[in-house]
Image: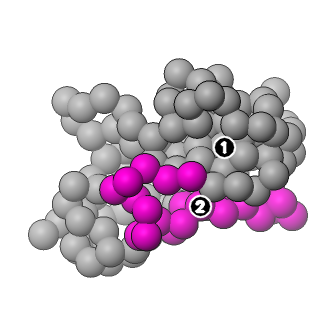
Amino acid sequence: QVQLEESGGGSVQAGGSLRLSCAASGDTLDNYCMGWFRQAPGKEREGVASMNGFGSTIFTNSARGRFTISRDNAKNTLYLQMNSLTPEDTAMYFCAALKARRWPSRPLDSNEYGYWGQGTQVTVSS
């Protein structure tokens, strides 16, 4: 089974950028649908972006146009490039995996994913 480890979080000012990484071990990422999720204090976990095993991507409305999801197969690593960050992006960010190349019926629903990393904190100040 795959193990996931996120990195790249930190504190930035509004308008800044961060790139999150999700390093996978135990299996190859192109066998999986991968997702980035976030959870702010007192809020439910929400899907941000997803990439299926064929490289197709999907974004939540708030992320579209600002965030990019990508995968480096040689490094077996998933990325989330986040630009034009706002304080509303402050949250713990998690990567998740579903062992299927095709998307599930709800690719931004956390219930669809069975493998999770520990998360990396992103804090955006105004």
Q: Does the magenta stretch include residue 64?
A: yes
Residue 22 in view? no
* Left or right, 5 with reference to 25: left
Q: Is residue 121 magenta?
A: no
Indicate the position of residue 124 as horizontal and vertical percent values.
24, 63
The residue shown at (49%, 53%) is 59
Question: Does 42 sit above or below residue 124?
Answer: above
* Left or right, 26 with reference to 36: right
Disc 1: which residue? 34
What's the amino acid at mark 2?
A: Ile
Along the viewing direction, whichever of 48 and 91 lies nearer the viewer:
48
Where is the C terminus found, in terms of image quarters? bottom left
The residue shown at (17%, 66%) is 125
Q: Are marks 2 and 1 in contact (CB under 8 Å)?
A: yes
Among the 4 quarters of the image, the one containing residue 41 = top left
Question: Which residues are the magenta region?
Answer: 58-82
* Left or right, 107 with reference to 126: right
Indicate the position of residue 78 as horizontal and vertical percent values.
67, 56
Mark with earlier residue (2, 1): 1
Among the 4 quarters of the image, the one containing residue 100 = top right
Indicate the position of residue 120 as horizontal and vertical percent values.
45, 48
Label 2 CA crowd tier, 10 Å (few <14, some 14–19, many 20+): many
Q: How many labels does the image show?
A: 2
Label 1 CA crowd tier, 10 Å (few <14, some 14–19, many 20+): many
Disc 2 from disc 1: Cα separation = 9 Å
Disc 2: which residue? 69
What's the amino acid at mark 1?
A: Met
**Residue 21 numbered tag:** none
Along the viewing direction, whichever of 1 and 114 lies nearer the viewer:
114
